[in-house]
Amino acid sequence: MSAAIFLKPSREKSLLRKHPWIFEGAIAQVTGKVRSGDTVEVYDADKNWLARAAFSPQSQIRARVWTFDAAETIDNGFFIRKIERAYAARQHLMQSNETTAFRLIASESDGLPGITIDMYEDIL
């Protein structure tokens, strides 16, 4: 088994509603060798799979969910798809003469928790 987070009983409720944050106090156990930024499997107290998340041992938000889909792999293709989708959603801003600054990647809103990229003129 790869690195995993097991939640305390009844602490999966927010994840079941697709909230992407797992706070330190919700975690019963972390298994496997896990470093900051590693992707971990997330399970409820009954060992039911819930999500894949980025682990952050220094933060109150101990993990941020990448996906709630067990079939989705977190690899380069995952990030390319998410970035392309965000880029397409903001294409109209890039073509507009009304602004030269906008948020290209909006973290959880774009399915990339913890990642924010702003564009100012032609600088990211």
Image (cartoon, rainbow, N blue to C red):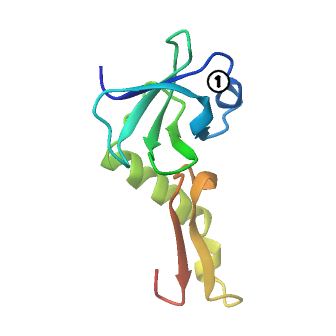
Amino acid type, residue under disc 1 in the picture: Glu
Q: Is residue 11 visible?
A: yes
Give me the residue at 30% from left, 27% from top: 32
For this rendering, which residue is in front, 62 or 49? Answer: 62
Horizontal side of residue 51 vs 73, given as left or right: right
Q: Crowding near pointer 1: few (<14 within 10 Å), some, many (20+)?
A: many
Residue 115, x across and y down, in percent: 50, 60
Direction top: furthest residue: 46
Relative to 40, does residue 37 appear above or below in the rendering? Answer: below
For this rendering, which residue is in front, 28 or 124? Answer: 28
- The quadrant the N terminus occupies is top left
Instruction: Choose top left, top right, bottom left or bottom right for residue 15.
Output: top right
Give me the residue at 67% from left, 25% from top: 16
Relative to 105, does residue 41 appear above or below in the rendering? Answer: above
For this rendering, which residue is in front, 47 or 59? Answer: 59
Instruction: Choose top left, top right, bottom left or bottom right for residue 110.
Output: bottom right
Residue wearing tag 1: 12
Give me the residue at 56% from left, 18% from top: 44
| Number of numbered discs visible in the structure rendering | 1
Give me the residue at 58% from left, 80% from top: 94
Residue 70, x across and y down, in percent: 46, 24
Relative to 40, does residue 35 appear above or below in the rendering? Answer: below
SS assignment at label 1: loop
Residue 85, x across and y down, in percent: 53, 56
Residue 68, x across and y down, in percent: 54, 31
Relative to 116, does residue 74 appear above or below in the rendering? Answer: above
Q: Is residue 72 visible?
A: no
Instruction: Choose top left, top right, bottom left or bottom right for residue 27.
Output: top right
